[in-house]
Image (cartoon, rainbow, N blue to C red):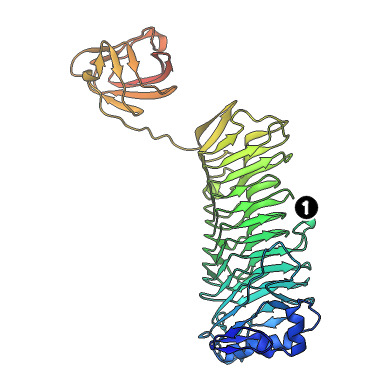
Amino acid sequence: MSLTKAHNRMVDSAEVSVFDYLSNTQSADVLAYTFGVDVTTACQAALDAAHAANKNCYFPAGGYLVTGLVIPGVVDGAGTDDRNKGMRIYGQGFGEPFFLLNTGGTVIKSVTDAPVLQDILGTAFSSNGTIRIDNIRFDGTSNTTPVVKLTSFYGLSKFHDCQVYQRGTGDGLTLGWGATVSVHGCYVMNKDLFNYSLGASRVGTGILYAPTGDNGLVTISKCTSRGWLTGYQIAGGAGAAYAASIEKCEASVIYNGVILPANADKCVVSGCYFEGGDGGVGINNEGDYNTIRDNLFFPGFATVIQDLSTSNKGTLIEGNLIGIGSTVGGKGIAIQSSAFFGGYDKSITNNSLTYTAGTAGVKGIQIAGTSPRLQMIGNSFDPRGAWTGAGSIKFDDQSVEEGPFGLITQENGDYEFPVLSGGALSLFSGAALTEGNVSSNILTIPNGSYFPVTATVATTVNSFSAGTLEGRIVVFRTTNANMTFADTALNQLAGGASFTGPGTITFFIDKAGANNYAYELCRTVF
């Protein structure tokens, strides 16, 4: 251990302190958080020395004014790189993230149109090895670049417990090549973090992961993105993003929450918190096999979850709490599927959708496309009854030609009910019935919708005991003429004619009080 000059701190032998590279004037300015003296050269020298000596680089508490720092790396065009390196760049923390006076902790600030910190994309995507960056506030003023730009951030590299603050119009944190990277516990905010109702005039993306080549397994967790045009974006670069995730994050005072472009594949957005209030889209998905699960959306988005690509596959939207509130014309979920034989299957299950009663033009779930393939079940709505307000409706089917194919939901007044749309009906076969199922001329029907009937002696059925279900359809296939279904006050047979068989007879059985009323739908005699 050794004591650094101009700074009363013991430094580990595996660590390079930036203070060892500052002059006394620079040290005084940094410790006073004056940001009056450019310390780029000293900070870069410390980074270079740490990298060369296989040590970590420590930025003690203070305010560092720079024109832009570069994480060292090898770029020689001959296939030599630093993929075997490992390095940590860290500071003393930054205090309460919304307190932006920059008078405590470790603050690295730039007032130029350049990243405060960036790495080098060398001869391979993984050319810089494994880098960990943590406990620093990066304060930038760039319009054409992000505050932090990591284009070769590979393997187990981590960007943890940092703050990124953009005073210009550029992005916050961008990742290029970033397979298996972790971004965790960061606040990424811009100059408009306290300005509401800016709508589409907002600028920049808080955290942008746009791979320069196909890669995946990037995890963004426990982060806050605030003030941006778009909170988070996965994919959209030259390469596809595979199995990336945004989990337990927040997006607030933003226009769009999350964007998943067409080359975002098998990605997951889960357990996140979204504040609307500025229009835009909560989550816009255009990629394949992506999952949007267990998120909380507060009112204010024009469309909360949107999936309007006619060619993407396998979307799963489930378990989300979707607040539409009093957004006139707002949509909870807007989904579309169109292609040969009805497009690819998408699922909307077990979501809860709420709105302010009386708001006009609200669509809970809107489906569109040419004969879309959808599974839409288990969703709940608040208020429970029919939605009021001119043009407001729980389900809005805008599909054309044959309509949707799949198990969907429709509404009738205060109720929603499942419907098999555009599909074949396969009946559930119950146990074979005999005269043993008849007592006092009452045939007890177990669970099921189709029953073979074989009576060995003459038996008459005057009524049914069909359980507690209302509106049950049951088909009987009689194998002989021993069981007779009689026309009675409880059994209404076509034309008053009893049925014996062999053949099939189908009843609609309605529960009314203690009685089951059976109405014949059709019969066939063999």
Extreme residue in the front direction: 8
Q: Where is residue 202 in the image (x, y as percent from the top left)?
A: 77, 58
Residue 55 position by quadrant: bottom right
Query: Does residue 385 lie above or below 42 as drawn?
Result: above
- Quarter placement of the N terminus: bottom right
> Between 370 and 243, which is closer to the camera in this rendering?
243
Q: Position of residue 346 (x, y in %)?
A: 53, 48
Query: Does residue 405 lie above or below 99 as drawn?
Result: above
Query: Residue 526 vs residue 123: left or right?
Result: left
Query: Does residue 11 lie above or below 478 as drawn?
Result: below
Query: Does residue 385 lie above or below 118 as drawn?
Result: above
Q: Name the residue under label 1.
A: 196
Residue 137 position by quadrant: bottom right
Residue 238 position by quadrant: bottom right
Q: Where is residue 281 in the image (x, y as percent from the top left)?
A: 68, 51
Amino acid on which disc 1 is placed: Tyr
Which residue lies at the image location 64% right of the left edge and 84% below the top edge? 8
Could you tell me how many numbered marks the image carries?
1
Q: Can residue 2 be seen in this view?
A: yes
Q: Where is residue 75 in the image (x, y as percent from the top left)?
A: 62, 89
